[in-house]
Image: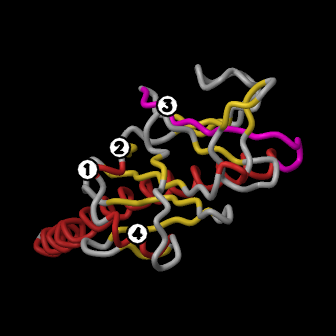
């Protein structure tokens, strides 16, 4: 009986140590998963833009459920349509506007060349899509005779999207540089670091 009590005590001590660590790993994997899924979706939009020789926009739907999609069917961002690439974002992960994200100056300093005055566009909100031109570069749409165009004639464009885990308050960002490079970042509490 004494041996059984000792074994149970040891199991409880190990569980008390392992459960919080396991929960931290689960929360971290959900946050990283959202960033990885969005990065993949943006790469899909970039590749499809080049292949189809047209621009495509990627939207984040605030939800519920929280989702992001590439508008390849041309519905103008009014919602996901069958045929559009789509990802689900875990309900624990919230897209957050750049104005509420921590230390964006640090991230902007790493994303853009020194002395750049380019304003990074916030793709975290549902109204601001991340757009790739037919050359695979991020772009801003311009009204033109006969419709709308999106190419580098509108000038260099960069985007960032911020996610926060509602359970741990940890942050992750996905950026698109003016050259079209999609990168993930993790906030350490003071600075952003590439993942």
Answer with the quarter of the image where residue 85 lies. top right
Cα distance in 3D space between marks 4 and 2: 23 Å
Residue matched to label 1: 167
Residue matched to label 2: 92
In the displayed structure image, the side of residue 91 where residue 89 appears, left or right: right
Cα distance in 3D space between marks 1 and 4: 23 Å
Q: Secondary structure at mark 4?
A: helix
Q: Circle 2: is it few (<14), some (14-19), or many (20+) Cα within 10 Å?
A: some
Cα distance in 3D space between marks 2 and 3: 15 Å
Q: Position of residue 32 (x, y in %)?
A: 47, 60
Q: Which residues are magenta?
A: 50-63
Dot placed on the residue nearer the N-terminal end, 4 or 3:
3
Pair 4/3: label in front: 4
In the displayed structure image, the side of residue 55 where residue 80 appears, left or right: left
Seen in the picture, residue 70 relative to 3 is either above or below; the reply is: above
Q: Circle 4: is it few (<14), some (14-19), or many (20+) Cα within 10 Å?
A: some
Query: Which disc, if any, is residue 107?
Result: 4
Cα distance in 3D space between marks 1 and 2: 7 Å
Dot placed on the residue nearer the N-terminal end, 1 or 4:
4
* Residue 8 painted magenta: no
Residue matched to label 3: 61
Q: Secondary structure at mark 1?
A: loop
Q: Nearer the viewer, residue 114 or 105?
A: 114
* Residue 136 visible, this angle: yes
Q: Secondary structure at mark 3?
A: strand
Q: Residue at x 29, y 68 (%)?
A: 21
């Amino acid at each position: 009986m004494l041996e059984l009590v000792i074994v149970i005590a040891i199991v409880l001590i190990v569980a008390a140590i392992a459960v919080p660590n396991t929960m931290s790993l689960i929360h971290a994997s959900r946050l990283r998963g959202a960033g990885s899924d969005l990065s993949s979706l943006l790469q899909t939009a970039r590749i499809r833009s080049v292949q189809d020789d047209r621009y495509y926009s990627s939207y984040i739907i605030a939800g519920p459920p929280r989702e992001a999609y590439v508008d390849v069917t041309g519905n103008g961002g009014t919602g996901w349509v069958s045929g559009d690439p789509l990802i689900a974002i875990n309900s624990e992960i919230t897209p957050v506007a750049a104005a509420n994200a921590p230390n964006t100056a640090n991230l902007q300093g790493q994303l853009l060349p020194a002395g750049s005055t380019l304003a990074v566009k916030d793709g975290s909100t549902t109204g601001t899509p991340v757009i790739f031109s037919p050359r695979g570069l991020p772009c801003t749409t311009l009204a033109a005779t006969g419709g709308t165009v999106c190419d580098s004639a509108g000038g260099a464009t960069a985007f960032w999207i911020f996610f926060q885990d509602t359970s741990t308050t940890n942050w992750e960002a996905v950026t698109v540089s003016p050259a079209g490079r999609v990168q993930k970042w993790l906030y350490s509490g003071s600075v952003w670091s590439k993942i």
